[in-house]
Amino acid sequence: MTSIFRPLVLTGIALGLAVSATAQDAPAANTETAAVAEAPAAPAMTPDQYIGNPEYMLNLDLSTGGRVVIQLYPNVAPNHVARVKELARAGFYDGVKFHRVIEGFMAQTGDPTATGQGGSQLPDLKAEFNATPHLRGTVSMARAQSEDSANSQFFIMFQPRFALDRNYTVFGRVVSGMQYVDAIHMGEPPAVMSRMVQVAVAADNKPMPPAAMLTEDQPAPAAAADIGVDQLNAPIR
């Protein structure tokens, strides 16, 4: 799974990281080498410093109708949290679609190309695997085979999947608005892709977009089968 993030002035964020990012059921072998962003180690934060602190809350305004609020976990994944906040403040995530959505598993986004192979220009992040479990609402970074390949893509869990624990970097959890995550269109890729209309750090106090923007097209109904004369004349059972 892959996900990454860029400085505040993103005049033209490149869309292409050449590696595919996906959430998988089993651990992936570390077979890939790439530039990895490592920040200086910082003292671990305590819950009273980040729980409920707007600087460590992320607002996702979705095309499914409303706002999803994510509590970020800088205590266990400080570099990933910093990356996502930076990208959000740069507007990188605005309009980005959910390109891989598996019922009963997870919804993945964060790729501007909506192909699963895109990301930001920033170098990949060094893994910050931690003991936080992948529960319903958990938010975790996508990556490719290399453990240190997370970039800009992330996924939100629909249901627990403990096989992912300590194999993907958990950096937050949905604390409100999970119904809007549940409403994301399913598919790999979905016929109609739901999107993040606006993503912002709560401390920045960005208002929610108008309701008219928080809507999306509905998938086309399945084509009705042709009804022949024999079927029209068939007895009712």
Image (cartoon, grey):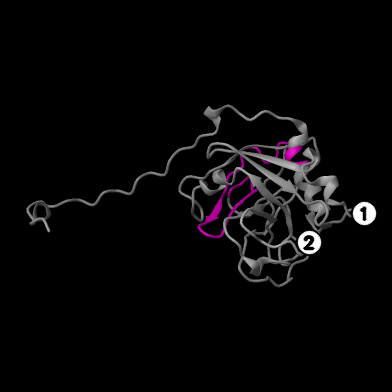
Q: Is residue 100 magenta?
A: yes
How packed mark 1 is, by other alpha carbons closer than 10 Å (few <14, some 14-19, many 20 or more), is few
Amino acid type of the residue that numbered disc 1 sits on in the rendered structure = Pro
How packed mark 2 is, by other alpha carbons closer than 10 Å (few <14, some 14-19, many 20 or more), is few
Identify the residue shown where x is 43% and y is 41%. 218
Q: Main secondary structure of the magenta part?
A: loop
- Quarter of the image with the C terminus is bottom left
Q: Position of residue 158 (x, y in %)?
A: 57, 56
Q: How many marks?
A: 2
Instruction: Check disc 1 and report the residue beneath it.
Output: 43
Q: 214 left or right of 76?
A: left
Q: Position of residue 79 (x, y in %)?
A: 82, 52
Amino acid type of the residue that numbered disc 2 sits on in the rendered structure = Ala
Residue occupying the far front of the picture: 48
Q: Is residue 136 above or below residue 57?
A: below
Quadrant hosting residue 197: top right
Q: Position of residue 139 (x, y in %)?
A: 67, 53
Q: Is residue 223 above or below residue 1?
A: above
Instruction: Check disc 2 and report the residue beneath it.
Output: 34
How far separated are the C-alphas under marks 1 and 2?
27 Å
**Which type of secondary structure does the marked residue at label 1 adopt?**
loop
Q: Is residue 1 above or below residue 205?
A: below
Residues drawn in magenta: 86-114
Identify the residue shown where x is 74% and y is 42%. 57
**Which type of secondary structure does the marked residue at label 2 adopt?**
loop
- For marks 1 and 2, give the one nearer the viewer: 1
- Quarter of the image with the N terminus is bottom right
